[in-house]
């Protein structure tokens, strides 16, 4: 990948020589204008010939640019007169946080080294360039007067991430004698405002799409605020929550005052006039809190009262909520959303639908859980859906139909200093067309290639930075399963349902960290809540699989369809953790329905003998998973099931493993016999 960067990206002539090539004698008479020191294994002191050549290059009267990575960093340090040492454990992995000492920015980097440069031994005119945010070891050096620099990590790592690939631009710029921009801190760390009293807007009563997840985020928010010595005023009419509980302890300290009042703009303003808080947090209470915050900001009442919105600012929130603004913002950075138009009346909706072409997705703007949404195949269906959507919002969205594409999302955290990380990525078991709240969700993603994963990660960081999000948000994608074509579905500039899932799946407290960031702190200074010593500026790496499975209560109601679509119907969900997908999908089935002993098809009793199995597969319902399993148990091929459901073949192959194992166990008939055949007592 180093060669690709130089030859393909930067179009330079690159000559590769052995480690012991005598640069001073230059026996092959190779012309060179810059020197690159590549990576390599082991102790750098075992390369005296290389060090000798580097020393020659350092002492040239007219300096030529030098750039080293990994072992190259250690060799450049030794050539300059510094020392290296053997580390106790070394730094290995693709999620090592490194701080650029010029700007204070922290980058996630791939590393694999057991030796390091001793920063205290650097001679005059040499300074540390990067340090590790966790153990504070040296991660790069730079000459203060000449174009010599190196880094300990791998900015070129083909596995990714490639956040620091700009270092190649800098080096090639030096070689071509192009003036390089000055990199400095933004100074925001010195502009932090001290807050004494903050108003937290809760999510209100429980509803589909807005329930216990926001109690979790609100409770974490209160905990973070209390740690900073801030008085917390909470408005939340729901008495059945942890955040409104009168029982206080270190884990759930509780708010100083709780108002059990409806979350309405006028009510919130009455509390503001009475309590006179310094700031208000509207990103922890779902869409209800967000809508109230937007209304109060647009009316000018928050500004008049001198109350600052903490975290992501209202203009950025509106940019994610208003489809037209969102589309324009993405165009500015070369990204696209699914073809979409907004409408304020039925005629505009019809015009938009015919411009896109049927079928289309109709949904209400500024709504949660896909409220009032659905797919329309013709003008009549569109009119019916549009009238329904206009009852919940004065603006509706007509979107391109992308059913069958993969649906993915990334949880992203960004601070005011522009440090930006992706904490968790998740993949829907069902293809696009089923609301995320009604789909089985798997974390981390299982079917993406490494290239696809980092392509979407890079886009997520770019979009979040451009929008100016401060705190936590999530970005949802549709990815064509037959190519690398993708489009952005939406960005939620707030804590969402999936944020609670991501927090518990990874152990990364998103709401807690987002609250600290909204107060002006940076990611590097916040400590990892698990280790208490390392930084929160890291991307969790999971060696296990997590599944979220929804629960429905549709059978409680007569004449209610169990078909799943773009409007959320589930009333709860469970989370299962295990070493394999086969393990977690069965754990989840047992938790959702205690009557089940795992994932079975016919034996589950949840499939129909009256409806053709193919019809049960083609129509997304609350029992389709069991119909899929029944088909596999009856000998359907993975390809045939995929053709009916568009569920990724990787997931189907895992379900086929379960079907085969179940069949083998049943045929064996004796558990002791089964164990003995596998070599167990």
Image: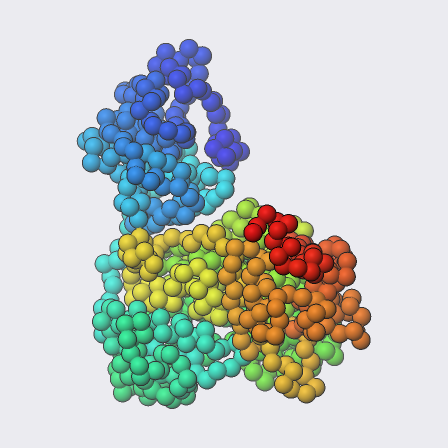
What residue is at 37 percent from the left and 79 percent from the top? 242
- Location of residue 405 in the rendering, given as x and y in whole percent from the top left corner: 65, 59
Q: Residue at x 59, y 63 (%)?
A: 585
Q: Nearer the viewer, residue 291 or 667?
A: 667
581, 38: nearer the viewer: 581
- x and y percentages locating residue 493 in the rendered image: 45, 67
Vertical placement of 169 versus 47: above or below? below
- On the image, the x and y values in percent for residue 228 come to 24, 68
Left or right, residue 146 beside residue 585: left
Percent across and percent down for residue 640 are 76, 57
Residue at left offset 30%, top offset 42%? 130
**Residue 490 shows in the view:** no
Asked whether 303 or 27 is in front, the reply is 27
In the image, taking residue 549 as reference, residue 299 lies left or right, namely left
- 602 vs 125, left or right, is right
Q: Where, by quadrant of the figure, is residue 506 drawn?
A: bottom left
Tell me how the rendering is colored: rainbow
Quarter occupied by residue 659? bottom right
Q: Tell me if residue 666 can be seen.
A: yes
Residue 182 versus residue 555: which sits nearer the camera?
A: 555
> What residue is shown at x 50% (from left), y 42% (from top)?
159
């Amino acid at each position: 990948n180093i060669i690709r960067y130089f030859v393909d990206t930067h179009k330079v002539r690159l000559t590769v020589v052995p480690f012991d090539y005598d640069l001073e004698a230059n026996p092959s008479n190779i012309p060179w204008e810059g020197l690159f020191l590549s990576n390599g294994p082991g102790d750098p002191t075992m390369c005296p010939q290389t060090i000798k050549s580097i020393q020659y290059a350092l002492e040239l009267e007219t300096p030529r640019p030098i750039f080293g990575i990994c072992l190259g960093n250690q060799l450049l340090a030794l050539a300059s007169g510094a020392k290296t040492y053997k580390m106790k454990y070394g730094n290995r992995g693709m999620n090592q946080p490194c701080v650029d000492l010029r700007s204070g920015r922290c980058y996630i980097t791939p590393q694999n080294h057991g030796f390091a440069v001793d920063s205290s031994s650097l001679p005059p005119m040499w300074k540390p360039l990067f340090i590790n945010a966790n153990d504070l070891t040296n991660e790069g050096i730079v000459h203060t007067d000449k174009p010599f620099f190196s880094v300990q990590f791998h900015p070129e790592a083909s596995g990714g991430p490639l956040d620091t690939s700009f270092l190649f631009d800098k080096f090639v710029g030096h070689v071509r004698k192009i003036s390089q921009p000055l990199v400095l801190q933004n100074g925001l760390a010195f502009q932090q405002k001290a807050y004494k009293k903050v108003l937290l807007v809760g999510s209100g009563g429980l509803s589909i799409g807005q329930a216990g997840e926001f109690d979790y985020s609100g409770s974490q928010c209160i905990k973070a605020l209390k740690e900073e010595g801030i008085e917390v005023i909470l408005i939340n009419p729901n008495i059945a929550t942890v955040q409104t509980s009168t029982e206080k302890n270190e884990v759930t300290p509780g708010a100083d005052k709780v108002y059990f009042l409806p979350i309405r703009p006028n009510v919130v303003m009455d509390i503001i006039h009475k309590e006179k808080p310094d700031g208000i947090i509207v990103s922890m209470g779902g869409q209800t809190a967000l809508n109230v915050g937007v209304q109060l900001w647009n009316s000018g009442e928050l500004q008049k009262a001198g109350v600052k919105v903490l975290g992501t600012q209202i203009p950025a929130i509106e940019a994610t909520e208003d489809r037209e603004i969102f589309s324009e913002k993405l165009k500015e950075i070369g990204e696209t959303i699914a073809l979409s138009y907004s409408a304020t009346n039925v005629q505009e909706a019809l015009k938009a639908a015919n411009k896109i072409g049927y079928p289309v997705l109709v949904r209400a703007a500024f709504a949660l859980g896909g409220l009032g949404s659905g797919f329309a195949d013709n003008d009549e269906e569109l009119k019916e859906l549009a009238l329904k959507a206009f009852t919940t919002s004065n603006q509706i969205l007509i979107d391109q139909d992308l059913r069958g594409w993969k649906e993915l999302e990334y949880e992203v955290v960004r601070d005011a200093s522009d440090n930006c990380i992706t904490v968790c990525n998740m993949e829907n078991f069902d293809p696009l067309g089923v609301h995320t709240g009604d789909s089985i969700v798997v974390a981390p993603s299982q079917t993406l290639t490494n290239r696809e994963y980092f392509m979407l990660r890079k886009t997520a960081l770019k979009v979040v930075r451009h929008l100016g999000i401060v705190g936590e948000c999530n970005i949802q994608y549709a990815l064509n399963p037959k190519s690398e074509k993708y489009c952005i579905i939406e960005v939620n500039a707030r804590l969402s349902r999936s944020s609670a899932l991501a927090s518990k799946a990874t152990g990364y407290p998103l709401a807690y960290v987002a609250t600290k960031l909204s107060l002006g702190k940076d990611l590097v200074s916040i400590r990892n809540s698990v280790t208490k010593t390392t930084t929160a500026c890291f991307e969790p790496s999971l060696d296990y699989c997590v599944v979220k499975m929804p629960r429905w209560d549709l059978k409680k109601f007569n004449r209610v369809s169990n078909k799943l679509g773009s409007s959320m119907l589930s009333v709860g969900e469970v989370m299962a953790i295990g070493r394999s997908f086969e393990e977690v999908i069965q754990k989840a089935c047992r938790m959702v329905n205690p009557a089940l002993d795992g994932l079975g098809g016919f034996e589950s009793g949840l499939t129909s003998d009256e409806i053709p199995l193919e019809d049960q597969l083609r129509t997304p319902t609350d029992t389709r998973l069991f119909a899929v399993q029944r088909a596999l148990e009856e000998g359907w091929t993975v390809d045939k099931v995929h053709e009916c459901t568009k569920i990724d073949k990787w997931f189907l192959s895992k379900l086929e493993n379960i079907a085969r194992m179940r069949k083998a166990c049943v045929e064996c008939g004796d558990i002791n016999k089964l164990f003995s055949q596998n070599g167990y007592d």
